[in-house]
Image (spheres, rainbow, N blue to C red):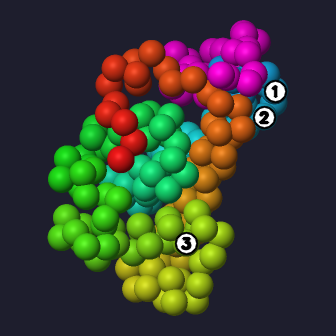
């Protein structure tokens, strides 16, 4: 059962959320109980999604893996459709939980997934950094770390608030693998 009610947005915030995302998803409606934080959250999320240098397909793979690792059905459901739209292949989606043994991922994708798992575990070793650095410059490394860390926060907040799936996600997304 959801722990916080859906909030009504102040007109200025409602307008900005609509500009960014269309109809706000349930996560934003729950976060709306704190208007200043949901405003900052959505601007930050927008920057990660639309102002990044690394390919969106790569970041969506990271987000899906984060959802798997955290057992976040909501994160998985919301980003599955975004990942498909960005160009993540169905074979990659099916193989994501076992990416280490799959031939569906190239070296850059493997490095990003390795980083995702390390960030999610809170243990980015020198070996992980060295491997990721083979494929990404410092700016891209920061961007990927932020992506991994932000979507850990998303999963943790979804769990803490027990946000209900959006209606369109219930019908659209298969269960979390």
Magenta stretch? 1-28
Indicate which disc residue 121 carries: none
Compared across the picture, whether 12 is left or right of 80 comes to right
- Give coordinates of residue 13: x percent, y percent: 71, 19
Counting other residues with Cα less than 10 Å from the Cα at mark 1, is it few (<14), some (14-19), or many (20 or more)? few
Residue at 67 percent of width and 22 percent of height: 2
Counting other residues with Cα less than 10 Å from the Cα at mark 3, is it few (<14), some (14-19), or many (20 or more)? some
- Give coordinates of residue 127: x percent, y percent: 51, 89
Residue at 42 percent of width and 34 percent of height: 77
* Along the viewing direction, whichever of 46 and 166 lies nearer the viewer: 166
- Give coordinates of residue 33: x percent, y percent: 79, 22
- Marks 1 and 2 in Cβ contact (< 8 Å): yes
Compared across the picture, whether 65 is left or right of 43 comes to left
Indicate which disc residue 118 carries: 3
Q: CA distance from mark 3 to mark 1?
A: 30 Å
* Along the viewing direction, whichever of 136 and 158 lies nearer the viewer: 158
Q: CA distance from mark 1 to mark 2?
A: 6 Å
Quarter of the figure with residue 16: top right
Is residue 108 shown above or below 28? below
Q: CA distance from mark 3 to mark 2?
A: 27 Å
Location of mark 1 (residue): 34
Image quadrant containing the N terminus:
top right
Q: Specify whether residue 21 is painted magenta.
A: yes
- Give coordinates of residue 174: x percent, y percent: 32, 34
Is residue 87 shown above or below 11? below
Dot 2 falls on a residue whose secondary structure is helix
Location of mark 2 (residue): 37
Dot 3 falls on a residue whose secondary structure is helix
């Amino acid at each position: 059962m959801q722990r916080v009610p859906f909030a009504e947005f102040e007109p200025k915030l409602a307008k900005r959320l609509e500009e960014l995302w269309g109809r706000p998803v349930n996560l934003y409606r729950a976060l709306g109980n704190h208007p200043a934080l949901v405003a900052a959250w959505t601007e930050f999320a927008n920057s990660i999604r639309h102002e990044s240098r690394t390919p969106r397909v790569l970041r969506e793979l990271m987000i899906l893996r984060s959802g798997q690792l955290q057992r976040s059905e909501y994160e998985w459901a919301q980003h599955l459709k975004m990942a498909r739209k960005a160009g993540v292949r169905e074979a990659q989606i099916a193989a994501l939980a076992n990416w280490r043994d799959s031939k569906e991922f190239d070296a850059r994708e493997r490095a990003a997934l390795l980083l995702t798992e390390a960030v999610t575990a809170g243990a980015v070793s020198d070996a992980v950094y060295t491997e990721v650095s083979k494929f990404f410059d410092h700016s891209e490394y920061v961007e990927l770390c932020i992506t991994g860390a932000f979507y850990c926060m998303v999963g943790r907040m979804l769990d803490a608030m027990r946000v209900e799936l959006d209606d369109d996600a219930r019908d659209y997304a298969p269960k979390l693998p």
